[in-house]
Image: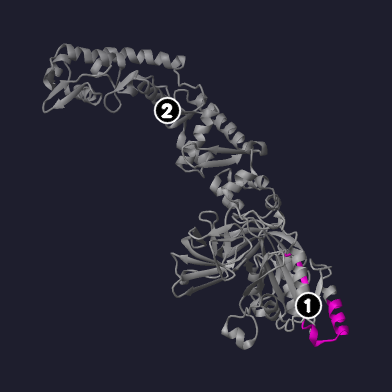
Amino acid sequence: MGTSDINNTGTHPHFTIGIAGHIDHGKTTLTKALTGQDTDRLKEEKERNISIELGFASFTLSNGHTVSVVDVPGHERFIRQMVSGVAGIDMVLLVVAADEGVMPQTKEHLDILNLLNVNRGLIVITKADKVDEEFIELVTEQIKEETAHTFLSNSPIVEVDSLSGRGIDRLKQEIENLLANLPSRPTSGIARLPIDRVFSKKGFGTIVTGTLYQGKISVGDEMEILPQGLRVKVRQLQVHGSDQEQAYAGQRVAVNLSGVDKEELSRGDVLVTPGSLESTQRIDVEVTLLDHLDFTIKQRSDIRLHLATSDILGRIIFFDRNECQPGETCFAQLELKEPVTTLFEDRFVLRRPTPMTTIGGGMVIDPYATKHRFGPETIKLIAAKKDKDVSARAKHILGEAGMLTLDELTRQLGISPVDWQREIDHPAHQGLKQIENQTSPLTLVTTMDWWEATWNQLQDDMKNYHQRYPLREGLDRKQVQNKYFPQLNTAQWNLVLQQAEVEGRVQVRNEALAMPGFEPMLRPKDKEIWQKVKSIMLEKQLEVPPWEELLPTQIPQDVHLDLQQWLVRYEYMVPLDEGRFLSREAFDKAVQRLKTNTGRSFTIQEAKDIFNTTRKYLIPFLETLDKLGYTTRKENKRYWKQRNS
């Protein structure tokens, strides 16, 4: 066996095939012939001899590859289960009974397979023992006609008698041939298992089953159930009835979970790597309507979404039309009544709630969509997000969001941070900018264009602000965040500022942001005013008038305030009480005068005699001495303190 037969986990690749077709065409019997296992598990199924729920079994090909088989219900009332079973398969066997030929559910199943983009398959004519060769030839021609414009055109057609086993070996060989060049699903990155069955077993507790779409799951792993956000732990894993330490993408898996009760879960929930995905109720999609519909789908029509194992009611919203015609492909948004957990390129089927008929299906483009306006710009946006290239999609997402954490971005992309680093080897080369915190796992991502444009605009704002308010420190830090980076929290905003400072784009001055090299400076007219005010302060000493009375009346109020704050900030003035200030020179002279005329301590009366002033002016000065650490008050005396210069 060559190394190409082994995947990167060191195990054989795992594949899942679905068996679809009309009711009573022998799907379950064919499954038993392939696997030796009876997939009907409900009492009602046994009694009525039809499949209601999904049936699962497996067999091994001659090359060692394990194939899981999903036997999906054929009755039109159980299309929900059929879609659930087909989503996630690698290929399909479309079953047609020799004695009936193509029937209504055969056609609907074929429509659904096409809508879900299943592109590998075989056609199996069952019950070949019940008719003669001539009739089989007629059925074969009918099948070729019905599949002519589908993925099954030119596919092998295998005749079998499931009860006697005739044709089964050939069928297995054809399956092996078809799967030979199919690559294994990725086992790295996030794990995702849509749940199709929930039950409990005595001595084990809660068990869920499903096809592992991507990634791997190990015993002991902590996982998350969406949309509930429940954290659970994997106690035990079974693949095809055998206990395993790990399960890989493509396998049918039963997962024994701890930390959750059966009643908390249901079909449609998804088991994922913790924190890797979020559930949403609004998704942008590309929808194709079946061409044989005899009605149009109108704006905001009610729909039923079948995606993976989910079945959710909602409405369809178009942005460039008021209805979509049969056979047309349209961009749209699905507004759902319940959360769905999905990723880019996931396939889905749409049905009418009543009557229950399949109307179309398509592909998820944006699993985390926001509300859009009606018009061509929205169509252009959704079309751009359809790009399969990771860096291109990242740019489209960031084009709307501006900046996201790496965790938020990879969650929207549906990949892990490890996958991101592998895909985006050199972010700058692809027009992306990654900002990393060296002391924590926090990483921010944006586009180079957005970063440059944002800081160019912000620098223009800072320059204009400095010109208008030359005495102020700069723009208010919080207001800048609210305007340009509202999506960031405090830690993220601090990281942005650190990066911008390193790049020489900004100067962080306490709670203000300024241009690099900017220093608030007095203009000549400010210096002239200050000289006059300072002279008055020296003359009046402790009996200095309020600040407003010292300035010329024609000076605007905001200039008054800016000059006052600048003089205090740079210690040219010392505030006494509300509205009154002393120049540093006048203050120092007053302190020296008091020190010279007192011993280690002094009373208010002694200070009053020294300055020959009233308590109105003296008390604010003495309290300022206490506040600045010149003195300390004990009862009715103040004591001089040793101060560091």
- Which label sits in the foreground, 1 or 2? 1
Camera-side residue: 329 or 269?
269
Look at the numbered disc 1 and give the secondary structure of its residue.
loop
Q: Residue furthest right?
A: 134
Q: Mark 1 highlights which residue? A: 167
Residue 542, placed above or below residue 126: above
Can see residue 295? no
Does the magenta segment cover residue 410?
A: no
**Residue appearing at x 21%, y 19% in the figure:** 642
Q: Quadrant of the N terminus?
A: bottom right
What amino acid type is highlighted by mark number 1? Gly
Look at the numbered disc 2 and give the secondary structure of its residue.
helix
Percent coordinates x, y for residue 436 in the rendering: 53, 38
Camera-side residue: 322 or 401?
401
Q: Mark 2 highlights which residue? A: 558
Magenta region: 118-142
Percent coordinates x, y for residue 512 in the rendering: 45, 31
